[in-house]
Amino acid sequence: MKSVISSILAAAAALLMCGVIGNASAFSSPAASVSAFTPRAHTVSVPRTSSSLQMVFGNKKSAAQKAAEEERAAKFWQGDWVCKDCGYIYNRAECAGLYFEEQGAGFRCPQCSGPRRRYAKKVGDVVGTTLDGGDAPILIFSFGGVALTIAFGIWAVNNL
C-alpha cells in the first residue's frame, strides 16, 4: 500500500517538475497556458483621450462652480457628526453626498438605526449635543410621566 502511494506521489512530482500540471488551467487550453508564459514581441498601447479621462475624473470645475461649492460648504458644520449610540462617524460619501444638516427627520444611523437626534458634533475629542436639544425633552417628559403615574397611583389607593 505504501509503495503504491509513494509511486503516485513520485509521478505527480515528476509531472510538476516537467510543467505538465503546473501550467495547466481548468479554464484554458494547454496552448493558451504555454503562450501565457512566452514573452511578447510587441505591445499595443491605446492612446488616452480626454473623453475617457472625463469619464473617470469628471469635467473640470470652473472658478464660479468652485466658489459656489465652497459657499455651500461654509453653511454646514465642517467637523464630524458622531452617533452617540454606536460611535459611527457620518460620512457624506456613504449618504448620497448630503451634508448631515441636509438629512431629513427620518434619517437613521446606517450602523445602529439610531434616530438623527442621537448624532452630536465632534470637536477634537469632545462630543457635544445637537442643536435640536438632544435627549433633554424626552427625559423631561419621561420623568414627568413617571411622576404623574405615581401620583395617580397614590390618589387611586387613597380615594378608591
Image (tube, grey):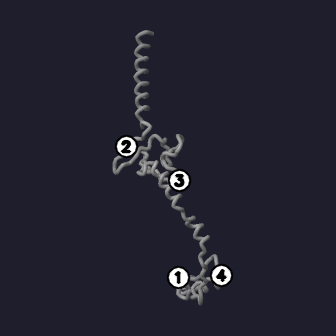
Q: Position of residue 90 (x, y in %)?
A: 46, 50
Q: Which residue carries the number 3 mark? A: 97
Q: Earlier in the sequence, mark 3 or mark 4?
A: 4
Q: Is residue 80 left or right of residue 64?
A: left
Q: Nearer the viewer, mark 1 or mark 4?
A: 4
Category of crowding for the residue at label 4, using alpha-carbon neighbours closer than 10 angstroms: few (below 14), some (14–19), many (at least 20)? few
Q: Disc 1 and disc 4: Cα gap in Å?
A: 25 Å
Q: Which residue carries the number 2 mark? A: 128
Q: Is residue 108 above or below residue 35?
A: above
Q: Quadrant of the C terminus?
A: top left
Q: Nearer the viewer, mark 3 or mark 1?
A: 3
Q: Position of residue 74 (x, y in %)?
A: 45, 51
Label 1 sits on what residue type? Answer: Leu
Q: Disc 3 and disc 2: Cα gap in Å?
A: 23 Å
Q: Which residue carries the number 4 mark? A: 29
Q: Earlier in the sequence, mark 2 or mark 1?
A: 1
Q: Residue at horizontal 57%, vertical 67%?
A: 56
Q: Residue at horizontal 43%, vertical 9%?
A: 159
Residues at badges 3 and 1 in contact (C-beta under 8 Å)?
A: no
Label 2 sits on what residue type? Answer: Gly
